[in-house]
Structure formats: C-alpha cells, structure tokens
Image (tube, rainbow, N blue to C red):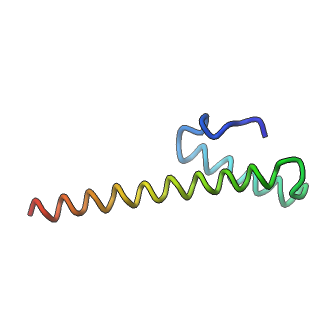
Amino acid sequence: MTVSLESLFSDADLLRALVRARVAVEDAGTGGGRLHWLTALEDEMDRRLAARRVRSSAAFGALFLAS
C-alpha cells in the first residue's frame, strides 16, 4: 500500500482504507505487506476511537460539573 497513515485526515478516509485493506487480505492473502497495513489501519482506528471516548467523557464531566 502506498498511502501513509498521515494522509488519512478524516475518519471516513481511514474507514475506506480499512475496508480496502481487508478486501485485499481476503482476496490476495497476507503477504506483500497487506497484513501489516491492515494491522496499522486497525491500530489507528482504535487510537482515534479511544481519543474520541476520552473527549466525550471529558465533555460530559464538564457539563455535569457546570450544572
């Protein structure tokens, strides 16, 4: 794969790349760096979801304290 994680600006870009990587692994197997790329994309998605949960919890906590 030639796309770097830094160029996946939006979650939609990341999700599209993740789907393409999964299809590539299913169609052509895990060689040629395909499994590594899929793993890297899944890790990035997990990192973004964890960051979103932290922001959401912080926002809820601030809202709770303000009331």
Residue 55 higher or lower than 8, as above or below: below
Q: For this view, does 67 lie left or right of residue 21?
A: left
Q: For this view, does 32 lie left or right of residue 67?
A: right
Q: In the figure, residue 53 lies in which quadrant?
A: bottom left
Task: Pick the residue in front: 39 or 27.
Answer: 39
Q: Which residue lies at the image location 59% right of the left edge and 51% below the top edge?
A: 44
Q: Which residue lies at the image location 59% right of the left edge and 36% below the top edge?
A: 6
Q: In the figure, residue 65 lies in which quadrant?
A: bottom left
Task: Pick the residue in front: 42 or 16.
Answer: 42
Q: In the figure, residue 3 lies in which quadrant?
A: top right
Q: Tag count in the figure?
A: 0
Residue 45: x and y in percent read 57, 54
Q: Which residue lies at the image location 62% right of the left edge and 51% below the top edge?
A: 15
Q: Which residue lies at the image location 33% right of the left edge and 59% below the top edge?
A: 56
For the N terminus, the image quarter is top right
Residue 32: x and y in percent read 88, 47
Residue 59: x and y in percent read 26, 57
